[in-house]
Image: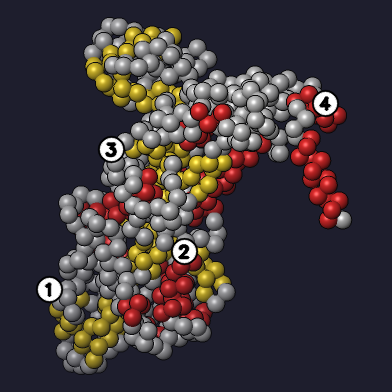
Amino acid sequence: MHRHKQSLRGHFLRAATIGVAGLTASLMVAGVAAASTPADPPGGVAPHFYNGNVEGIRDTGSDTTFFLMQRIGDLYTGAGLYGCTLNASAGQTLYNSSDPASTTSNEEFFCLSGQNVSTTDVNDNWDRTEVTEGVDDVGSGAGQNQLCAALSTPLTVDFARSSKPSTGACSTEVQTGYAKDGVPIVSYPINPNVYGTSTTAPYSSINGGVVGPVSKGWLPGDSPAGPYTGSPLNNIANNDNGGGASSTAYRLWCATDSSRITDWGSLTNLGPSLLIIKASTTSGSPTVTISGNFQSTVASGQTVTGTGIPSGTTVSSVSGGTLTLSNNATATGTVNLTITTTTKLAVGQGAPIGVAIRIMGVNTASGTEATFASYAESGVSGGGCSSNMDTNAASDPNPATDTGDNSTPHIALENNSDQMNEFAVGDWPSPDFVDQAIEVSTTLYIESNGVLNTNPYAAASTIDGTSYSATKVEENGSNPTSGTELQNTYPTARTLFNIYLSNTVRASTGGFLNWICDGNTNFSKGLDNTTGLNFDQELGNLIATTFGFPRLTDESTAPSISTPADGIAAPNTACAASILVNTTSGSDQITLASGAFPPDIVNAGGLVGGGSVGVTDANFPAGTTVVSGAGTSTLTLSNNATATTTGVSTSFSGVPAVTAVANPQT
């Protein structure tokens, strides 16, 4: 049987060398001979930059887009199944005889000239490029540094996956933005009491070790099963209290002084049933004292209840950390009191409840961390998050295991909530599920919105086999949606990029990046004969549906807000070609200082930019289109320019980003 298989394989290999005539005859038997045979595509020009050479290209960088780019790379590589007919022996006429390497006898390395078959697809990986994803030194910053040779890499990097804009690791970086995302804050609404009562410090000191879901508004004294007298955590802002260093976001993640928020009560114990813990009373005295000051909403006439407080007691006066009751206390000691205030406190101003907030650190090379650090640091120069957002990252709270490596802050990879439980298991070895649950339920983390929406495992943390989904916390009162991300109204909206170097980009890389960027406008993608779907439809489904990132193409318009509250510009137009042009007021022509406009710049008689010929060029009336001039140094437009400028960056809607390559033969 083994010899028989080998014999069949030999027959198949020999059949591959018979020639196109024999292959065509076979296809006729298969019933596809009615399809026309396409001509060879143009060589060496945008947007495909075909050269007839089989190449491998590789990216590295962002964890956020790793799995998405892996699927896109697989789709593009699979499209190569319908690519050119490869050479099977030496001496055959090749598509690109100008390539010095084409004179070799390497089989299956080069495309034949004029030898396409009826299933050939000339718009989707005709060169049969193979795409792979790198995983060394994961993170957007690391990927850009490897691309720029500022960080070692074991294998060549052709482009960098990045969930943040170009860092300037080298001056020739060019970013192509093909999707949107956001970076929400998340909490974990776990009820630790489901697993019992804590008996280990520090959690045993919270309400006698009986702890409920703090993010839902549980306060000490409440039943863990509810109802809860506190406020659920729904929003964290970087623009409250005047913004800057006074904002709740800054005080949580960045502040290192006395303004730092460390207690869950600051976020959830807001009143009007305001809990005051560890208040000191003396039997026979109306004086109550606390460490620190009473909250600003505490005032005379408000009802006070608690152990040793007579019914009907109210506040007579309050100053700093001293309060005078209308009646004398009947007990001496440290008690918890409840004061019924008339108004609620703002988030970040609540009274402490003795439950520590755990800030989860995130890989500092990641775009997710960089985006959120800029949000928390907004309005502050050189503050605690100027280097990264891990300033206040929590470490192991268990005194029994807080040694060695566990004594350092917990720093997670981005976009995987399950790591919360992995840290908790290390801090509180099983079967201490109650303390594991308390640790996770008191943690604040950040994560890609696309990942949260589409990956249940990465969006949850597991305690004793039960998964608890993370809950998104609003930022500045806004939720991450396709609309808020596309318009940059969500504070941590960002663009997802693939970044290349203009001075080294290969033809195979340029063609692949343009294939992602174009939305079936500059060229029409073909049919995937393995699914029956158009390749662009499959590409859009992968980006927007499977992975939850609103797609951007070379036709996307500029957002309503160019820079969201994270302080990082998140353009929607980076998939369109951006070219430096010269304009003359009153003239309908634009020119280049040197060279020629890409030959693919005119599509279907003209291009409509987002409000002008270029989505970033306001020097033309709305609706201006390209009339003629593709491939030359002068374009004629449908309207006259309104200003005279030199070297203005102009984005051409419908033209994918890469307009020229440095290495046309690879």
In the rendered image of this protein, does residue 599 appear above or below residue 264?
A: above
Q: Which residue is mark 1?
A: 319
Nearer to us: label 1 or label 3: 3
Residue 207, x across and y down, in percent: 37, 84
* Callout 2: SS: loop
Real-space Cα distance between discs 4 and 1?
96 Å
Residue 393 visible in image:
yes
In this picture, residue 546 sits left or right of residue 2: left
Q: Residue furthest left?
A: 319
Real-space Cα distance between discs 1 and 3?
59 Å
Residue 542, x across and y down, in percent: 57, 43
Going by the numbered disc 1, the residue's amino acid type is Ser
Q: Which residue is mark 4?
A: 25
Q: Are marks 3 and 4 in contact (CB under 8 Å)?
A: no
Going by the numbered disc 3, the residue's amino acid type is Ser
Q: Which residue is mark 3?
A: 171
Q: Nearer the viewer, residue 318 or 566?
A: 566
In the rendered image of this protein, does residue 531 appear above or below residue 379?
A: above
Real-space Cα distance between discs 4 and 2?
56 Å
* Callout 4: SS: helix
Q: Nearer the viewer, residue 313 or 381?
A: 381
Residue at 48%, 45% (x, y): give it. Answer: 58
